[in-house]
Image (spheres, rainbow, N blue to C red):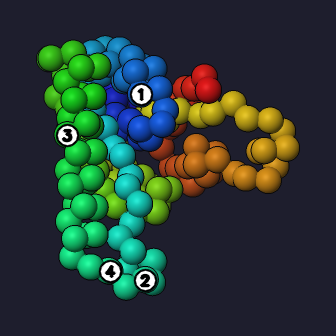
Amino acid sequence: MDTIKNIMVAVDFNDSIGELMVYADSLAQKFKSKVWVLHVADPEPDFVGYEPGPQYIRDIKAEEYREEHRNLQEVCKNFLSEDIITEALLIQGSTVETVMNEAQKLNIDLLIVGTHKHSFLHNLLQESISLELFKKAEIPILTIPIDE
């Protein structure tokens, strides 16, 4: 791989987003890459087999999604250099499948994700999203350890 044209940073608002963005910024400047910042939101209730519920609940959820998207845009603005082309994406769905589908659709050359440090027992009982991404990815992944 001679160049990295498209970098995707998969973020969870519980992570230390700044740590991930430092790496994305550095690599994007070096390779003159575009940075896609992706957050996967929970799917709609009817997606997982439940009735959609009253309209006011749907309105509240829609406002939450708009706010999350504004937050992603602020992350791009605050953590990435002005000369880097960025795009904030908020997509509903299953996390691993959504990240992989978007990476393929956008021709991503490098995926950056955070990984939490957990105990052996925790890792044995519950597989992490970053590990699942690592298993399914067909592109290079840069995993950044996130302090709890």
Pinpoint residue 118: horizontal percent, then vertical percent: 73, 35
Q: Secondary structure at mark 4?
A: loop
Residue at 19%, 24% in the rendered image? 77
Q: Tell me if residue 6 can be seen.
A: no
Q: Amino acid at mark 1?
A: Ile
- Res 51 quadrant in image: bottom left
Contact flag, marks 2 and 4 (Cβ < 8 Å): yes
Of the residues tagged 4 and 3, which is closer to the observer?
Answer: 4
Q: Residue at left 47%, top 56%?
A: 95
Mark 1 or mark 4: whose residue is earlier in sequence = 1
| Residue 82, x across and y down, in percent | 15, 17
Query: Residue at coordinates 59% horizontally, 34% vertically from top-left?
Result: 115
Q: Dot 1 corresponds to which residue?
A: 17
Q: Which residue is mark 3?
A: 70
Residue of label 4: 52
Compared with 14, 68 (above or below) is below
Instruction: Report how far apart the C-alphas of labels 1 and 3 lie in the structure.
Output: 15 Å
Q: Nearer the viewer, mark 2 or mark 1?
A: 2
Measured in 3D between alpha carbons, the distance from the residue under mark 1 to the one under mark 4, in whole angstroms, is: 31 Å
**Looking at the picture, does residue 94 appear above or below residue 136?**
below
Q: Are marks 1 and 3 in contact (CB under 8 Å)?
A: no
Of callouts 1 and 3, which one flags the residue occurring earlier in the amino acid sequence?
Answer: 1
Q: Mark 2 Cα within 10 Å, few/some/many (few <14, many 20+)?
A: few
Q: Are marks 2 and 1 in contact (CB under 8 Å)?
A: no
* Amino acid at pointer 4: Pro
